[in-house]
């Protein structure tokens, strides 16, 4: 199975495959033989519980630090094999556990002889390095994550598995084992969040984590108090200048009163699970809002964004059917916007769910096309009716001939697949003129209309229609709708 890497078409696609693990007792010795320490730690094989394992690991690290020579660095690398659910889903948990255990063994061949390796859990491990310089530590990190990136062999194919490392160094970053461990873990978390192969502990990372924690708690509180609000951005059909629908975009006014863009809190909500109540809240608000939109001319479709984990959530089907029923009652259509990650990350059950909903009359749009990774075979299978070209291509379309070529190619691809193309992020007349010329059927962007409160939508449409009948869409000035942030 190969995937095509966007945004620059043509590059070979890397498949990131990983699997879910179960936390079991250590199946192999938790560390590489190192000096005379093995006796003290071997008892962990009989002990259960990650807390116990952690404390044993810390005392092992402590002894390693004590043995270190003056003037040398002791680096702790905490590593995690990422995204295991795909291996587990595709090949079963046993295969996944076998892979993890083999990987820890392989580390012994990659690292210098007698390097202590601690197996923290099925997919987490720690490595202790005794080095004379920071650049040696980094060489080892590059070697582990790039030169020897783990792979899993499936038949004739070799699929890469991501490994993320966090590094903390004694004595520069901490002068005791417990703090060193915590800081290496923090660096590992940071690396994962920043999508880096590895990261080194930074002294301000602790404060940043605390700030992030507060941000997460504030968001959870706002969701519980139902303080989030749904705004709607119009989508127009270029040829007829008809407003064919609106996209629901969630908005959060933070405790300080400032609007926080969805692009800032949605990724975090996806990581923490808060995306689940946020999605249901959006569905509820959309369902309630359409009851006030009788004056809007049909056909008219409401689009909701659905993150990859929601597509496979147990309540998703029931919730979406309830939303569909509410929209049907008022004669509105429903479109679900999903991103390319839904196809790459998701398993076949996501695709099967999409097909079931298509049969019920729900439309699908592939959002932000070009931003992530697309498998052409999935794209062919996906019963989507719309393909939304990511705004990063549209923003530079007037000046970047490559982006123009890409949009042209995507339009041709969408035609071949029977999908209509929406150009998103149209924020000036020139961009609208170019996408029209390139054959995009629909447009959405600040130039046409900003996301707005639900109560403003019917009046906005009236004004738009009055203006569009007298003024060419290409030179139409943007609506004086207040910016939402
Ligand atoms: P998206 O679905 O691609 O939504 C379009 C984003 O582009 C919106 O940002 C919109 O405000 C912005 N946009 C629209 N026209 C223009 C333009 O002309 N220029 C520029 N620069 N930007 C434009 P927003 O609302 O911050 O949302 C960002 C992303 O967050 C969305 O991208 C979507 O992926 C996600 N999101 C928003 N609401 C929800 C939601 O209710 N559920 C989920 N799962 N994701 C959501
Ligand atoms: Mg969208
Ligand atoms: Mg988009």
Image (cartoon, rainbow, N blue to C red):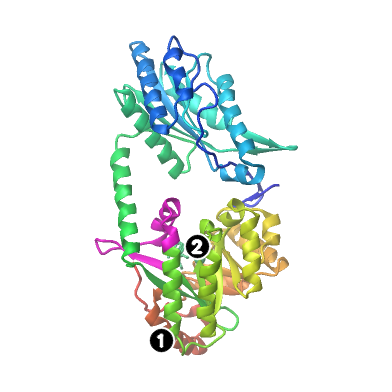
Q: Is residue 8 magenta?
A: no
Tell me the residue that label 2 is attached to: 395
Task: Name the secondary structure under disc 2.
Answer: helix
Direction left: furthest residue: 256
251 over 296 or under it: above or below: above
Q: Which mark is residue 304?
A: none
Q: Residue at x 25, y 64 (%)?
A: 257
Q: Is residue 254 magenta?
A: yes
Asked if disc 2 is less than 8 Å from ligand 1, the answer is yes
Q: Residue at x 62, y 46 (%)?
A: 89
Q: Which residues are magenta?
A: 249-277
Q: CA distance from mark 1 to mark 2?
A: 28 Å
Tell me the residue that label 1 is attached to: 459
Mark 1 or mark 2, earlier in chain: 2
Specify the quadrant of the image occupied by residue 137. top left
Q: Residue at x 51, y 80 (%)?
A: 327
């Amino acid at each position: 199975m190969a995937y095509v890497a966007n945004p620059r078409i043509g590059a070979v696609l890397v498949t990131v495959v990983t699997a879910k693990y179960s936390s079991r007792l250590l199946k192999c010795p938790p560390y590489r033989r190192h000096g005379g320490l093995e006796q003290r730690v071997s008892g962990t094989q009989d002990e259960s519980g990650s807390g116990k394992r952690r404390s044993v690991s810390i005392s092992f690290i402590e002894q390693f630090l004590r043995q270190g020579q003056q003037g040398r660095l002791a680096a702790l690398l905490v590593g995690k094999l990422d995204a295991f659910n795909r291996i587990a889903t595709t090949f079963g948990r046993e295969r996944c556990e076998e892979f993890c255990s083999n990987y820890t063994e392989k580390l012994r061949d990659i690292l210098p002889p007698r390097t202590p390796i601690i197996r923290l859990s099925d997919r987490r491990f720690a490595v202790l390095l005794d080095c004379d310089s920071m650049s040696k530590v980094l060489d080892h990190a590059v070697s582990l994550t790039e030169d020897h990136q783990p792979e899993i062999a499936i038949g004739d194919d070799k699929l890469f598995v991501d490994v993320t490392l966090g590094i903390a160094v004694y004595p520069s970053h901490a002068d005791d084992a417990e703090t060193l461990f915590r800081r290496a873990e923090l660096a590992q978390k940071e690396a994962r969040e920043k999508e880096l192969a590895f990261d080194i502990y930074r002294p301000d990372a602790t404060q940043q984590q605390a700030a992030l924690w507060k941000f997460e708690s504030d968001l959870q509180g706002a969701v519980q108090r139902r303080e989030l609000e749904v705004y709607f951005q119009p989508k127009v059909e270029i040829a007829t200048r008809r407003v064919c629908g609106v996209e629901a975009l969630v908005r959060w006014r933070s405790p300080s009163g400032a609007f926080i863009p969805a692009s800032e809190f949605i990724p975090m909500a996806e990581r923490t699970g808060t995306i689940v109540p946020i999605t249901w809240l959006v569905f509820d608000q959309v369902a309630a809002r359409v009851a006030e939109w009788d004056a809007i001319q049909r056909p008219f479709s409401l689009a909701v964004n659905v993150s990859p984990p929601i597509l496979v959530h147990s309540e998703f089907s029931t919730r979406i059917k309830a939303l569909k029923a509410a929209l049907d009652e008022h004669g509105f259509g429903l479109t679900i916007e999903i991103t390319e990650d839904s196809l790459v990350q998701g398993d076949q059950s996501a695709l099967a769910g999409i097909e079931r909903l298509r049969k019920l009359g729900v439309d699908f749009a592939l959002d932000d096309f070009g931003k992530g990774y697309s498998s052409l075979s999935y794209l062919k299978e996906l019963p989507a009716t719309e393909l939304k070209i990511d705004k990063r291509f549209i923003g530079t379309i007037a000046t970047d001939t490559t982006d123009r070529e890409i949009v042209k190619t995507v339009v041709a691809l969408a035609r071949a697949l029977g999908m209509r193309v929406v150009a998103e992020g149209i924020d000036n007349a020139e961009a609208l003129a170019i996408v029209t010329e390139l054959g995009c059927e629909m447009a959405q962007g600040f130039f046409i209309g900003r996301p707005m409160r639900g109560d403003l939508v019917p009046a906005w449409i009236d004004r738009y229609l009055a203006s569009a009948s007298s003024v060419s869409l290409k030179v139409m000035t943007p609506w004086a709708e207040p910016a939402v942030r």
